Amino acid sequence: MSGLLIRGARPYGEGEPVDVLIVDGEIREIGADLDAGDAEIVAAQGQVLLPGFVDLHTHLREPGREDTETIETGSAAAALGGYTAVFAMANTDPVADSVVVTDHVFRRGREVGLVDVHPVGAVTVGLRGERLAEMGTMAAGEAGVRVFSDDGNCVADPLIMRRALEYAHSLGVLIAQHAEEPRLTVGAVAHEGPNAARLGLAGWPRAAEESIVARDALLARDAGARVHICHASTAGTVELLKWAKAQGIAITAEVTPHHLLLDDSRLATYDAVNKVNPPLREASDAAALRQALADGVIDCVATDHAPHAEQDKCCEFAAARPGMLGLETALAIVAQTMVAPGLLDWRGVARVLSENPARIVGLDDQGRPIAVGEPANLTLVDPDAEWTVRGRELASIAQNTPFEEMTFRARVTATVLRGRITARDGAVAVRAGGF
Ligand code: DOR
Ligand code: ZN
C-alpha cells in the first residue's frame, strides 16, 4: 500500500494533532499514531491542515502573454500558494470566448498537473460587450466551463448583462462581473479621494463599482439568476451586498488579499506596483471589507493574480498596467489581516479560501470536509513560519509585487492534489511516475 501519511497536523487548527492517511487519492484513515506502512510521511507537527484552496479569479496569461505567465508557471505558483483549483480568466489573447480556447486551457492545465485549471469563458465576443459569446458550447466542451466573465472589462450594457444572466441561469452556470461603469472611469488610474487629488492622479469613484453592483443585483433578482461580484473594493459595495442578500437575491462576492491589506496611501511613491483595478481604496474601505469577510457578507477570497511584465509596471503611473501577483501570498495575507486580529479562525479560513469558492462554482471534489472517504485535496499551513516576500523567488514569470520585502507569518508548507504532493517546502513537485 503506497500513499501519504500526514503526521501530527491539526485539521482546521482545532483539537489534538492527528495523523491523516491518504491512499488512492482519498483520505483513508484519521487517528493517532497511524501505521505508515510504505506510505510517504509528511512531518506536520505544529501545522494546520486545511482543505485545498480554490481561486475563482486567476489570470494565467496563456495564450498570448507567455512572457508574463504560462499555465505551467501559474500552476506552480498556485500549488506553492496552497491552491488545488484555479479559475483562469478569459482575457487572454486570443480571448477565451470559444470552446477552442477554453478546451486548450483546460487540457494544458491537466497536462501540467499541478492544480485543476478551470477556464473561465468570456461573456461577450472578444470581451467587447456587444454580443454574447457561445456560452453553451463552452459549457458543453471538454472543460465544462461553469464560470463566465469579461473580467478586465465590465459587461456594461444592461441589456446584454440581463441576457447573459438569463442564459447563464438556463445553462446552470455563473456570471462573474467585473463591476465598473466605464463611463465613470474614463482616464482613471487611482481611487478618487484625497490621496489621488494630492498626487494629481485621475480618480476612480466608488460609484463606478457600486452602481454596477446595485444594477446587477436587480437584474439577477428579475432573472431569478445568480451573479458573482469580482474583487469587491468599497464599503458601499459591502452595504449593497448586505441589502441584496437580505432580499434573497442570489448574489455572491469575492475580495482580494490586496484589498484586505493595502490602501491608497501606498500611492505616494507613484510606484505602479500598487496600480490595480479596482484601485486600492481608503483604509476605511479595507476595514469594511475585512469585517464583511468575517461576517459572511463577502463569501470568499480570490486573488486576481494578474502578472505583468516589468516594462508594463516600471513606468509612468498612468501608463502602467493594473494588476499584481497574488497566488503565493494570499494565505499569508489572510492570516495577517483576518486570523491575527481574531476576525477569522482557521475554520473560517477554510471557509473563505476553499469551501465557499468551491460551493459558488459547484465543484464537488473541492472544499470538502477533512474526513475519511473524502478526496485528498489538502493544504498544510505552518502558522508560525516567518518569511519575507521576494518577487524574484516567486514561481511566476513576472516578478514585480507590492509585497516585496514584506515579512509575513504563516506559510503554505505542502499542497496535496488527489493524494499527490504538488508543492512542498517551497518547491514544486516534479512530474514523475504517475504524476
Ligand atoms: O488589476 C487588474 N488586472 N484588474 C483586472 O480586472 C484585470 C487584471 C489583468 O488582467 O491584468
Ligand atoms: Zn477584474
Image: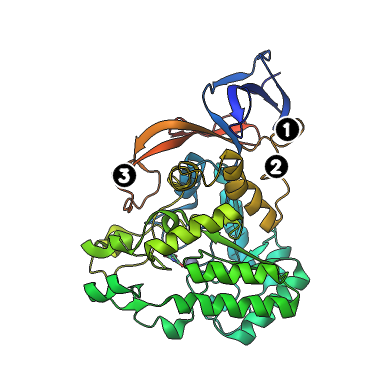
Of labels 3 and 1, earlier in sequence is 1
Task: Please give the residue where the numbered disc 3 appears in the rendered image.
Answer: 406
Q: Is residue 244 above or below residue 334?
A: below
Asked if ligand 1 lies within 8 A of label 3, the reply is: no
Amino acid at dot 1: Ala
Label 2, label 1: how far apart the Cα atoms are: 8 Å
Q: Label 3: state its secondary structure.
A: loop
Q: CA distance from mark 3 to mark 1?
A: 36 Å
Q: Which mark is residue 278?
A: none
Q: Is residue 4 left or right of residue 315?
A: right
- Residue placed at 70% from the left, 42% from the top? 368
Q: Are marks 2 and 1 in contact (CB under 8 Å)?
A: yes
Q: Is residue 347 left or right of residue 429?
A: right
In the rendered structure, are the residues bearing label 2 and label 3 in contact, judged by CB atoms less than 8 Å apart? Answer: no
Q: Secondary structure at mark 1?
A: loop
Of residue 159 and residue 245, the one placed in the foreground of this image is 245
Q: Nearer the viewer, mark 2 or mark 3?
A: 3
Residue type, mark 3 in image: Met
- Mark linked to residue 368: 2
Q: Earlier in the sequence, mark 2 or mark 3?
A: 2
The residue sitting at 54% across, 72% down in the picture is 150
- In this view, the residue in front, 395 or 112, is 395
Residue 181, placed above or below residue 242? below
Vertical position of residue 237 compared to residue 50: above or below: below
Residue 53 x/y as whole percent: 58, 45
Amino acid type assigned to the residue bearing label 2 in the image: Arg
The answer to which of 226 and 327 lies nearer the viewer is: 226
Crowd around label 1: few <14 · some 14–19 · many ≥20 (10 Å): some
